[in-house]
Amino acid sequence: MPLKIETFSNAVGGNAFYKAVTHPLAAAPAQQLLKHLKAAKSVAVYDPNNLASAFDAVYPLDGVKIAELFVQDAGHVGRVFHGVSARAVTDIGDMSSGTILIAAFDATATVERLRRVVPKDVVIISFDWLRIPADMAPASRPYLSNLNFATNFAFFRDADGLHTRLVTANYWTAYGSKEGFIWLALFDEGGKILAQWQQNLPAANAPIVLDSKEIRESFGLSPFTGQLFLHVVGAAGHDMVKYALDTYGDSNDVVSCTHDANSWPAERYAGLPAPGDGDEVILWVQNSHPTSIQAGEIGLNLMGNGEIAWFDSEIAPFATRALHVSSLLPKARWPQQIEIRAGKHFVRPRYEVVQKNGRRNIAHPNVEREDLKPDPELPKLKSLLGKGFILPAPILPLDRYASHVLPTPMTTTLEHLPVKLVLYDAEGAVVAERSFGNLARNESIAFQIDELLGNQKLVAGYGHVELLYDFEAGQDADGWMHALFRYTDRKAGHQAETSFGAHVFNTLATYKNEPQSYKGPPPGLTTRLFLRVGAGRARTMCHLIYPASLPWWELSDTALILVSNGGLEIARRKLRIPCGGSRLFYVDEMFTDTERETAGTNAYVVVRDTTCRLFGYHGLVQGESAFSLDHMFGF
């Protein structure tokens, strides 16, 4: 059964409440609280913000003798919790229980008010029992402030010649953060904490690098495959911990990259590809909660097929399990795609494609929305939004890479997806166009770019594609169009893939929070992208795309800013991208050897443009052996 938790809520606490009760440091106090409640002869629950059910989903109150339930909101009177019908808090003076649980944090004032009306011998406790250390949640703001819980998980492995490197920067200083630290906990495959530590946030804008090989050596650890939990204390502006995540190996033919997880769990994810012939697809299920996932609570089904294959094993709190897709869906084959029935037990997971040639790459599925339906207004808005929603992706140099596009339904209500593909050269000229038609939910078509180009050549040898709604083929558009983009090195056979969703780009008119901006409300007319620079022998490439739903500035005014280990600007280059075009560049060609040496080993590049919103992809190229690719994050 899906966990009955709200990760998006306008109630007091909202998403922060979920993060607060599932925090690793809250797990032991929560068990002590449950022990105390179970020892009581009878318990009254006062639930002023309707949060008791969410707590119960993570820490079941089975065994607690709940005799009475009191609520603040008159509209909640009569709702039932653990078989008890809610009464208004005005009746709490007549309670008969010996213990009151206040289902709220910051309950000191509430306790004082209740003391005036309940019997003197009543024991009053609250969720404040679960509070993490005071230096991690400042008393100057409410405990359930989102900024108190700037947290995230990362897939983290150092085993079998494979290592993981997480890279981000102290971007919180741009929003007013002064100082702080990161609290980290490394969990092994069974959910046991291998290491727990904290490190100060570096100087403003300075890079943050967490390398599994260095961490393993520092703590004297055996090989591990698990997850790293990060809590940024002192965050400002963003309560998301964004990062780029590289997998690298002891051999030169191992490289892959992905990025941060959404730090909230979903009931379903989609866009998981079925394995190709001879390949294996591994879904890395990483329990995000301090409670076990029971057998039969996680499942897979082919998109458009309601027959679910359930995973029949329990997964311990914070544990990691390799779920082989072929073990549940042995007949599934690329380009079929798979829905993940996650039950809100884990944040956006990672999957790993192990090719029959032994190469491997890591990517992620996406959140499948249950709250969206086809919007009948979207086909009518061409005059205001032009192309409307655009999903851009690179066409990497055709002499080396083959490119595939696989549209992926990403809402549970979508039965048809009308899409078309438009190819552009680097200067923004349309080269070719093809409609997929009105795809049924169970249709999976992976289109190879070469087939559409035929004998045509691209200026500069590369370009980009835009996936658009095709309203001539159908009218079912929900604004949540996604696709998976797979790239294959024609010579080495190495593979990389990435997926993302569509947005409205570079228009003045707005519609339902589109176009988005990296900072502030729409329209999204600026760019601030993070480009991590690879370590060692790997070359860092970046493919910037200038999509526009309506004609915008003829040329972008893009700055590439090389930032040092200390967060200082070392060098700057200008880049002009034609509207509707793209630019592919390598960091070692854009900046001199001297500049890169001055910047240091953990340098990064900021892609900044105040005139338009760009969309970017980054990757590492290791000679003729291997490469990686994923989309970039903005901050």
Image (cartoon, helix red, strand yellow):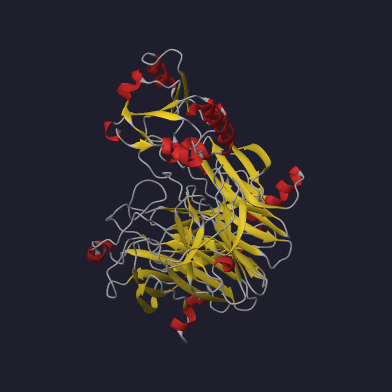
Residue at horizontal 65%, vertical 70%?
A: 359
State which quadrant residue 567 falls in. top right
Foreground residue, 224 or 203? 224
Find residue 170 and report its horizontal and vertical position in percent: 55, 43
Q: How many marks?
A: 0
Residue at horizontal 39%, vertical 62%?
A: 502
In this image, 281 relative to 502: left or right? right
Tell me, yes or no, if residue 575 can be seen here.
no
In this image, 263 relative to 390: left or right? right
In this image, 554 relative to 168: left or right? left
Q: Residue 44, relative to residue 544: is it above or below?
A: above
Find residue 182 and report its horizontal and vertical position in percent: 59, 38
Q: Residue 304, relative to residue 313: is it above or below?
A: below
Find residue 490 and report its horizontal and vertical position in percent: 60, 78
Find residue 472 and report its horizontal and vertical position in percent: 27, 75
Foreground residue, 540 or 491? 491
Foreground residue, 432 or 275? 275
**Residue lying at the far bottom of the rendered structure:** 455
Tell me, yes or no, if residue 536 can be seen here.
yes
Residue at horizontal 42%, vertical 58%?
A: 368
